[in-house]
Amino acid sequence: AMRVAAAAAEEEEEAARRLPLYLALCNRSPSMLAALLAGFDGASAAAQATVQELLPGLLLHLPMEAVTEVLLAQLRGEPDASPPLAAASPLPLLALHVLADRATAVGGTVPAALTAGVLGLVSRLGPHGGAYAVPLLPFLDESQSVAVLPALLRLDKGDLTEALAALAHAEPPPLAPRALLLQLHLLKPEDGER
């Protein structure tokens, strides 16, 4: 049993040493991100922490369109990706936050394909689907914002507060504060069931 534990620890150390190299190779071939996303939830806590630490730096240098393609494939559960996500997985959420922050920093926007793709999947991703929309809220138009409100209402209180703040404080806000309050009032209770 001690040998097995020692061998597992050695394998983990070796994987941790190779991970930065793998991420550097993703710079040359963004499609390699798919394997990283697919294997993340099954990785050890140490490997997950390393990926979460290094991924934001990598995503700053990859073309947004390439990352969009990989992320949407992962969220859809397409071939060569892991099964569709049933819960809010931290790596795709981190990637969405990094892309949104990157777009905000340069005064730009995220690719329309990313916004449309994530919004199209929100209801299919179950009760946590709204979490994937949160980083993209400042980039939505009014109709997209109204459409995603029921999914946002299914989030836990802390995430819902973050989502509503993102909608209210975006520049310009996709929904004026009055319009946001009106839309929330018009929702039926079953629209936001948890």
Image (spheres, rainbow, N blue to C red):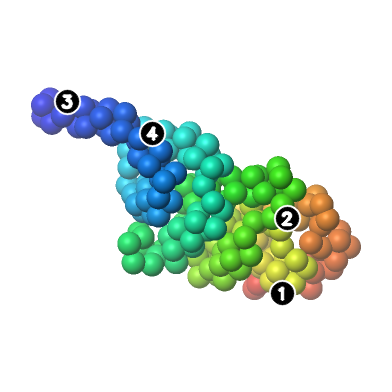
Question: Which disc number belongs to residue 20?
Answer: 4
Q: Nearer the viewer, residue 146 or 55?
A: 55
Residue at (79% x, 61% y) in the render: 174
Q: Which residue is mark 3?
A: 6
Q: CA distance from mark 2 to mark 1?
A: 24 Å
Q: CA distance from mark 1 to mark 4?
A: 48 Å
| Residue 54 in the figure: left or right of residue 189 | left
Sequence order check, earlier mark of 3 and 4: 3
Q: Which residue is mark 2?
A: 138
Amino acid carrying mark 2 in the image:
Pro
Look at the picture and state if 68 lies above or below 107.
Answer: below
Q: Is residue 159 visible?
A: no
Label 4 neighbour load within 10 Å: few <14, some 14-19, many 20+: some
| Residue 59 in the figure: left or right of residue 142 | left
Amino acid carrying mark 3 in the image:
Ala
Sequence order check, earlier mark of 2 and 4: 4
Q: Is residue 121 visible?
A: yes
Q: Nearer the viewer, residue 146 or 194?
A: 146
Q: Position of residue 24 (x, y in %)?
A: 41, 38
Q: Position of residue 129 (x, y in %)?
A: 55, 62
Which mark is nearer the camera, 1 or 4? 4
Q: CA distance from mark 3 to mark 2?
A: 48 Å
Sequence order check, earlier mark of 3 and 2: 3
Label 2 neighbour load within 10 Å: few <14, some 14-19, many 20+: many
Q: CA distance from mark 2 to mark 4?
A: 32 Å
Sequence order check, earlier mark of 2 and 1: 2
Q: Quadrant of residue 132?
A: bottom right
